[in-house]
Amino acid sequence: MIYNFNLGIGWASSGVEYAQAYRAGVLRRIGQEAKFIFTDMFPQDNIEHMTANIGFLDSEIIWLYTFFTDCKIAPVTFTLDRLEATFADREFSFSREGIRVKYDFSGTNTYYMAYMIDDQSDRVHRVEMVSNGYLVRKDYFTYCRIYSEYYAPLDNQAHLYQRRFYNEDGSVAYDEITDNDSVMYQFPDRFFCSKKELVGYLISCLQLTKRDTLIFDRTMNFAQVVMQNAGSARIGIAVHADHFSVNNTDDENILWNNFYEYAFSQHKHVSFYLVSTDAQNRLLKEQFQKYANALPDIVTIPVGSLDELKHPKKERVRHSLITASRLAGEKHIDWLIEAVVEARKIIGDLTLDIYGKGGEEVRLQALIAERKCDEFIHLKGQQKMDEVYKDYEAYVSASLSEGFGLTLMEAVGSGLPIIGFDVPYGNQTFIDHGKNGYKIPVSDMMDKKERVQKLAESIIHLFTKANLKKFCQYSYQKARTYLTVEVEKGWINLLNRTI
């Protein structure tokens, strides 16, 4: 079994979760059973909806909080009718607004607020119970009630003091007792004084053997306790980002990324480190040898794959640019907007479509309105991208850090030239300067204005000077390395030597 350890997941997931979903698909195809462990709490959403959304199977998911119950990972199917059946003979009035359904119980000064999974459904995700103006309890559902939260008023706010987790038949599996930042877990036969201990208990319950492999994708503070409870399982560390601080590294010392510091210090107990590009592989090997006098096994396997190369069935839209990412500050989508506005002064029909969701959406929409460019720059939201790239002429990125860049891979898989900054590791992997795009030199000394100007100049150069047909052909050739069949071979070779 391959176990993959992570913390959270969201609707606008990062590249780590998408990398895991890609891995899940590859492991299925090569007949290797896998599980994906998530340890965060998800009070606003059902974890199944988010994992299924990016391609996981329910049977592949282990969630820390239901692992100790017999409740299965499942979509929400609990209905309003089933909820009302729990009201016994109490009289109530019913009203609905969007996803919220309110039940008022006459003569009790009590009401329930039920939250549906969407504004058309009668499927209940959670119910909030309010008595005398105070929130006292929340119940959470999938196909049954999976847990409850209990609240007491404190400083005029609802204070969470307990969670209770249930089995399918409604019996109590265990309790989480909360006191501000302190948390304890009470089971019928044992007691844990921290979430770390609970995570360690989960790993010990898996009873891992030397035939199992445990891959860390994210660990935060859990790496030590997980490794301590992993038995004789092979340990793999997936490196998803730049692994060290350039500005805090010299000939004598290196400052590792704090996400990986503990895992790197334990290299004697790690079977392999997994990176997604050869450039990072070479650099990490050099650094281990220089700073730790060690030569650990470092393996390159792309975090994604292409089932096939995508070719357009009609002419690509002339002078069209695409970018796709989380709408987050570190992606610098605002620079792209400014650069396209500038470049359009030369290329009069230039367009940019921006795909993705995230916290920057409102600000980006405001910038588009401010710059009066809504006729040629569009926020397209979150979409299934498989068939989208091939309609465009080029891909553009303003990110200053891409551990791999799934969208970059997908772009070359549709034959797109790419414009981006010359930064590790994705751009350096997928852009060969002057052959299928442009890598823009960048330094800390360059301000935003200069970076925007360089992006604009590269866009203009691409569409006025480059041989787009040759660039396109080069991208297709480069993409062949990332075909699924090649990535599957990499996983087969790795697992055969670690079992």
Image (cartoon, rainbow, N blue to C red):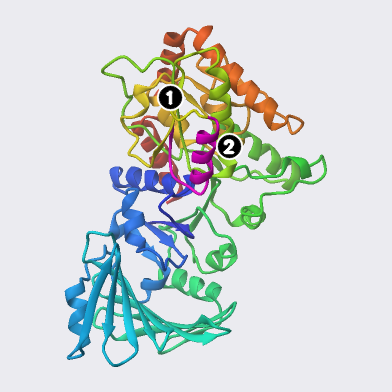
Dot 1, crowdedness within 10 Å: few (<14), some or many (≥20)? many
User: Residue 466's spot in the image, x, y percent?
Assistant: 51, 8
Query: CB of mark 2 within 8 Å of CB of mark 1?
Result: no
Q: Is residue 481 visible?
A: no
Image position of 384 with respect to 440: above or below: below
Q: Residue at x 65, y 43 (%)?
A: 295
Total numbered labels placed on residues in the image: 2
The local secondary structure at tag 1 comes to helix
What mark, if any, has residue 332 been given in the picture?
2
Q: Is residue 255 above or below residue 117?
A: above
Residue 95 visible here: yes
Residue 306 % position (x, y): 36, 32
Q: Residue at left 28%, top 82%?
A: 104
Give the percent coordinates (x, y) of residue 75: 26, 62
Which kind of residue does numbered mark 1 sit on? Val
Q: Is residue 187 above or below residue 479?
A: below
Q: Earlier in the sequence, mark 2 or mark 1?
A: 2
Q: Judging from the image, what secondary structure is the residue with disc 2 in?
A: loop
Q: Residue at x 48, y 7 (%)?
A: 467
What kind of residue is marked 2? His
Residue 330 drawn at (x, y percent): 59, 42
**In-front residue for pair 171/95:** 95
Nearest to the eye among marks 2 and 1: give it: 2
The local crowd at label 2, few if under 14, some if 14 to 19, many if 20 or more residues have their Cα within 10 Å, is: some
Q: Say which residue label 1 marks.
A: 412
Residue 248 figure quarter: top right
Q: Which residues are magenta?
A: 352-371
Rounded to the nearest angstrom, the CA distance separating label 2 from label 1 is 21 Å
